[in-house]
Amino acid sequence: MARLVIRGRNRLKGKVRIGGSKNSSVAIIPAVLLGEGESTLENVPAIRDVKVFAQILKDLGALVSLNENTMTISPNGFTSHVAPYDLVRKLRASYYLMGVLLAKFGKAEVGLPGGCDIGPRPIDQHLKGFRALGADVSVEGGVVRLYANKLQGAPIYLDIPSVGATINIMLAASMAEGTTVIENAAKEPHVVDLANCLNSMGARIKGAGTDIIRIKGVKSLKGTCHSIIPDDIEAATYMMAAVATGGDVEVSGVITKHLEPVVAKLREAGASIEQDGDFVRVIGPDRPNPVNVKTMPYPGFPTDAQQPLTAVLCRARGVSMVHESVYENRLGYVSELVKMGANIKVQGRTAVIEGTDRLVGSPVTATDLRAGASLMVAGLSAEGTTDIYRLEIIERGYESVVEKLKGLGADVTRVEE
Ligand code: EPZ
């Protein structure tokens, strides 16, 4: 276990380069198991979730080598259709193996992922999609069992634009017979990245990034070489750290289009933001303006950026409202910000934040990845020292976070417990 010790109030200055997208990586790493040859993935973030998935693939018999930000995967030895609970429990996104195993072997046994600190996170829409493709689905004893002697393309209307369900159905449908149409599909950047990767393997997917995705099944897929898109949420987190500390930070290696909702909201909060090519430069005000925000599926304001934004608004010149419409309870972390002197009231899915001119460093604990990001942003702008326990939760999704913050002039130290 480790903790991050932050001595706050340094205005962040300088440049930080963004790594590959965690959420794209955990979809594309299992996806390339569908190829008949070796695949190489570039710009893979060196984070815990990626390392865990590499281990899961090895446990399933694939040959995997991970060297810094390049992963090579050869599926030849991959013959098992069973992803046991002890693997799945380490990484929720391993439930993408359901779509992959079903497409590859016509059957799958995958331990049910648990809920987590942000809600129960059911997978009913995933299973609805698999049934529509002709699979028998049973869930008992904490295991999802899928079987189909042949997957048949079908129209599928998602009750909600679920990212995970869109991805899992795309994986299963890529090698089904006939055409699958997913309506009310998720449009997140990493859904598009996965579709592009599958198409580079010979899949025939059109419409990714819109709410209607058409997938013409193919008999086989080949290996590929694909570069993971940059992580828009990592970028958003450093942009918010710049705003929270009144800093001047250039965030590079991004796709500016993916950051539009975050740029718009931070400009409302008083930041001046220039964007050009693959970087955004963020200059924060001494104290942010209050803003109202409602998280929405892409291209709305991303739910994963809600927590770091709330940390910024703790020092706003007035009252802000943050409404979390994607998850049932993604505001639990607020109690840790209150320990630091934030004035926040939570009613249901809405947090009302009365800005104060000072936060005070305190010992706090990261309860989930983006809650940890929120505490990091708050600690950087607080007076005194903030100890964030369970730093490994933050390192699940933020590559070299201590080094990157140091590179921006933050006074941070990683302390092993
Ligand atoms: C992905 O989770 C991301 N994770 C999440 O990021 C992100 O918050 C979320 O998309 C929304 O953008 C990965 O990509 C690995 P959903 P996912 O299915 O796929 C409900 C992070 O911090 N729902 O779009 O689980 C669900 O309960 C993580 O990087 C159903 O009811 O998101 C939630 O309330 C956190 N039934 C909402 O939909 C289903 O079958 C959105 O879930 C599926 C989802």
Image: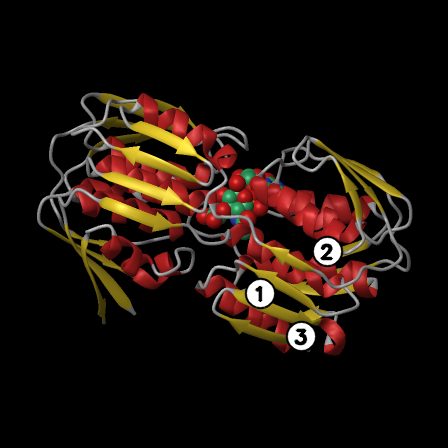
Q: What is the CA distance from the residue labelled 1 to the residue labelled 2?
A: 14 Å
> Does any atom of ligand 1 lie closer than 8 Å to the CB of label 3?
no
Cα distance between the residues tagged 2 and 3:
15 Å
Which quarter of the rendered image does ligand 1 occupy? top right
Q: Which residue is mark 2?
A: 99
Q: Is residue 351 above or below residue 217?
A: above
The dot on residue 60 is: 3
Q: Which label's residue is closer to the chain start, 2 or 3? A: 3
As drawn, the label of residue 410 is none
Name the N-terminal-most of marks 3 and 1.
Answer: 3
Nearer the camera: disc 1 or disc 2: 2
Q: Quadrant of the C terminus?
A: bottom left
Report whether the residue tagged 1 is closer than 8 Å to ligand 1.
Answer: no
Q: Secondary structure at mark 1?
A: helix
Q: Residue at x 73, y 59 (%)?
A: 100
> Which kind of residue does numbered mark 1 sit on?
Val
Q: Quadrant of residue 274?
A: top left
Q: Is there a contact, CB below 8 Å, between mark 3 and mark 1?
A: no
Specify the amino acid type for callout 2: Gly
Classify residue 410 as left or right of residue 145. Answer: left
**Residue position marked by numbered label 1 in the rendering:** 88
Picture residue at 51% right of the left edge, 36% below the top: 258
Q: Residue at x 58, y 67 (%)?
A: 71
- Residue at 39 percent across and 59 percent down: it is 399
Q: CA distance from mark 3 to mark 1?
A: 12 Å
Up-down: is 335 above or below 86?
A: above
- Element assignment for label 2: helix
Crowdedness of circle 3 by 10 Å Cα count: few (<14), some, many (20+)? some
